[in-house]
Amino acid sequence: MDRNAPIGVFDSGIGGLTVVREIMRQLPEEKIVYFGDTARLPYGNKSKETVIRFSRQIVRFLKSRGVKAIVVACNTASSYALEEVRKDEDIPVIGVINAGARAAVSATRNGKIGVIGTEGTIKSGTYGAVLREMKPGVEVFGRACPLFVPLVEEGLFHDSVTDEIASRYLSSLKEKYIDTLVLGCTHYPLLRSTVGKIMGDSVTLVNPAYETAVQLRTLLASMEMGNDEGKALPLEEKYQFFVSDLAEKFTDFATAILPDEVKNTVQIDIEEY
Amino acid sequence: MDRNAPIGVFDSGIGGLTVVREIMRQLPEEKIVYFGDTARLPYGNKSKETVIRFSRQIVRFLKSRGVKAIVVACNTASSYALEEVRKDEDIPVIGVINAGARAAVSATRNGKIGVIGTEGTIKSGTYGAVLREMKPGVEVFGRACPLFVPLVEEGLFHDSVTDEIASRYLSSLKEKYIDTLVLGCTHYPLLRSTVGKIMGDSVTLVNPAYETAVQLRTLLASMEMGNDEGKALPLEEKYQFFVSDLAEKFTDFATAILPDEVKNTVQIDIEEY
């Protein structure tokens, strides 16, 4: 295996770029091949079977690009498809859920953890199962927030409507006196201040995107697979972006949240993989 | 061609069921084969090229079921793909846009028509082009309302948040003194009372789903292709529902808006067509 091969990262669309941003910050020497399934997004309200099928196609595509490890940067795909994908592959595959869960169990003091995410992520119960396995006895309270993604995509990060919707979604979690809340969807860190204001200072917010980059760094170090020549590469060679639908929104969002402008996004037909 | 063959109807997901409902009401003798692309919904923010590719696959599927005519019950697909699909086919293909536009030009008195829809529908400019071709000199004002679909799918038909978002979206149209407003997305008739309240009694709301069923009835009559034995068929034989992702939401929404319970929804792999 080539230590200077890229990291493959995928998501249902654009949200996974929050994970890419963290990898760029924490592992500036690594090359990245990103795939966003913009033609078939969102995954959050689709069935397990469909999400597994889509994820397998994407993993085949990423492997065709010679990646040394894969990050499933989508909570829904991590919930539904991580185990399935992992058992087929000979390279490490990590998801956002384990990383987020690990941070949550170390943050909680009272053992009451909240998780917010898409319908798929919450219904799968994966966060709950992983959290309880890591720390038996924790109480986990999930809440689907299906309007958060469209609100973020409309740019309403700081808005009275977002405040109102967030208050409704979070009220059941406040009643449980959770002290830790996992932002279990890649779009949600962009609503961090709204969620923080409603939950109050006593609740720790966990961002799985950040934790995933930490885990990836540890993994590469332990395998001695960190890139040792990536720093000097020109950006276009270092970071490659692929999508299934070349909608402008991808480029706009990517440029808005990543440190450098994203110029060369390539569209591929993912259904061929 | 068999006059007793079914009508094929398709949509990106569940919204096209509002068109099915109108066909059931206005043409109770017709058989229907519906396809909802629930694995790849929504189409509203995807590119023209992708929507054309998806639409062609679906038309191939519907033709494999022996349909005598096809209704494109999705405004985005009608905007982007109707002409492309129509030129490949030997059976009539009608879309929601022409039907809606025809009703709008006959309703307007002052020649100022508003159109609301998804980003794709509005950006394509198809409603404007069709309206101006039907009645040169009309002024057309479009407004994308991307949060309406998620709000409908959350069931917030009558809600203060929906009122607030609708007020923002519609304010630019009110300033133009339109007297007619096309509900240019299949979900929007479910927000009819909210939109009507904001726009006021002097604005006529046009529902393309209703108008499409009227146009289909006229078309079948003129071709002498109306079904003459459909009335007595058992419902499961008469109305067949296919989807690309068997999410519960489809069955729930179908049962909520159609007159009879939808029991036998069949999942197919649309990427094979």
Image: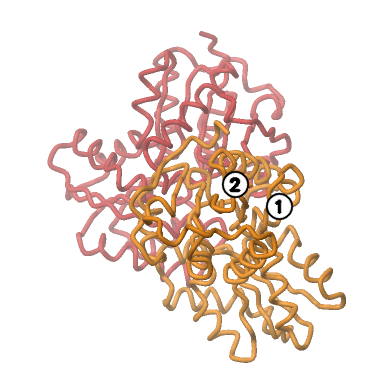
Chain colours: A red, B orange
Residue at the outermost right position = B136
Q: Is residue A74 left or right of residue B63?
A: left
Front residue (pair A99, B149): B149
Q: Name the amino acid, label 2.
A: Ile
Which residue is drawn at the image coordinates 57% and 28% (left, top)?
A28
Q: Are marks 2 and 1 on the same chain?
A: no
Which label belongs to residue A27?
Answer: none
Give the secondary structure at mark 2. helix
Label 1, on which residue?
B82
Chain bearing tag 2 is A
The residue located at (40%, 21%) in the rendering is A219
Residue B148 showing in the rendered view? no
Q: Secondary structure at mark 1?
A: helix
In the current view of this chain or complex, which residue is farthest to the top? A1
- Considering only vertical position in the picture, is B214 above or below B108? above
Picture disc at residue A257: 2
